[in-house]
Structure formats: C-alpha cells, structure tokens
Image (tube, rainbow, N blue to C red):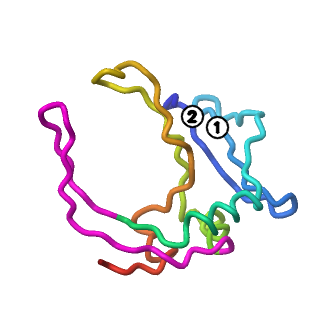
Amino acid sequence: MDRARLELFYVGETNQKVFIKIKDLRTGELDALEIYYTFEDLRKIIEKKCKCIAYIKAQSKKGDMKEFFKFNNAALLSGLTFEKFIDCVKNGLTVYDIRLGVYRSGRNKGKPHDHGSGFRVLKNNLNKVFHVENI
C-alpha cells in the first residue's frame, strides 16, 4: 500500500453495508470507488468463523532458512455477535487491514502474496469485544 493512503470505513445503516473508503493523505481527497461488505455477508462470516477464536502470543526466530516459534500463552475469544461487530466498527474498536505484500526472501522472493483483507480488533480492545478465557 502506498503510505500516502488511508483506509476509512463506516456503517451505512440504510443500505445495510460497511463501506471502505480510500483517502489520499497528500491531497485529502477520497477515492470515488465504492467498496463495501454487505451486512448479510458479514453476518454469515461472523456466525460461521468467529464463534470461537484462539488468540496465541508467540515469539518467532529465524534460523537455518526456517522460522521457529515459542508459544507464550493463549486465550479463547468468544461472544462476538453481528450486532456487537457493527458497534465495534461504529465506535472505532476495529481497524481494516489490507494484507498484501511481496516475499522478501526464499524461492518466492519478489512474488506477491495476499493474506486476505479484513477487520481486526485492536489488542487493547479484545476484552471490550470478546469474552476472553485464558488457557
């Protein structure tokens, strides 16, 4: 992503959509593209994929062309509903990530990768959004 751009999102209650807007930070202008998620699609995703989420804290270390992880602790996150998600978007408890990049090393060096875009709850807001059970 060009560092002079910012993604903004807002809830359109009347047309049942969460809109993503791109703002050019140099000019302050919003891109004219209409990018959105429908409430229906978001509800399906939340009900199917977000009932229980494992949140794991780990340290990573690279060596011998491999990445190693030391898992420090884990928590089970539950209780997210569609209504709670919409409130989180409205109240700024989430950010929107566009997770595109380019491999920096290895056999795929220079090739693009896409880990999918999506909403992310900021770490310091987890207990405002989910029931957190440390494991």
**Predominant secondary structure, magenta span:** strand
Q: Residues within 10 Å of mark 2 (few under 14, many from 20)?
A: some
Q: Residue at x 43, y 21 (%)?
A: 111
Q: Position of residue 39 (x, y in %)?
A: 76, 61
Q: Is residue 54 left or right of residue 119?
A: left
Element at badge 2? strand
Query: For the C terminus, which image quadrant?
Result: bottom left
Q: Residue at x 82, y 60 (%)?
A: 16
Compared to residue 15, the image places residue 107 above or below, namely: above
Compared to residue 134, the image places residue 13 above or below, namely: above
Verify whether residue 100 appears in magenta: no
Front in this rendered view, residue 80 or 7: 80
Q: Which residue is mark 1?
A: 23
Q: Position of residue 23 (x, y in %)?
A: 64, 37
Element at badge 1? strand
Verify whether residue 76 appears in magenta: yes
Q: Are marks 1 and 2 in contact (CB under 8 Å)?
A: yes
Q: Residue furthest right?
A: 14
The image quarter in which residue 76 lies: bottom left
Span of residues in magenta: 56-83
Q: Residues within 10 Å of mark 1 (few under 14, many from 20)?
A: some
Q: Which residue is mark 2?
A: 5
Q: Position of residue 113 (x, y in %)?
A: 46, 31
Front in this rendered view, residue 123 or 44: 44
Q: How many discs appear? A: 2
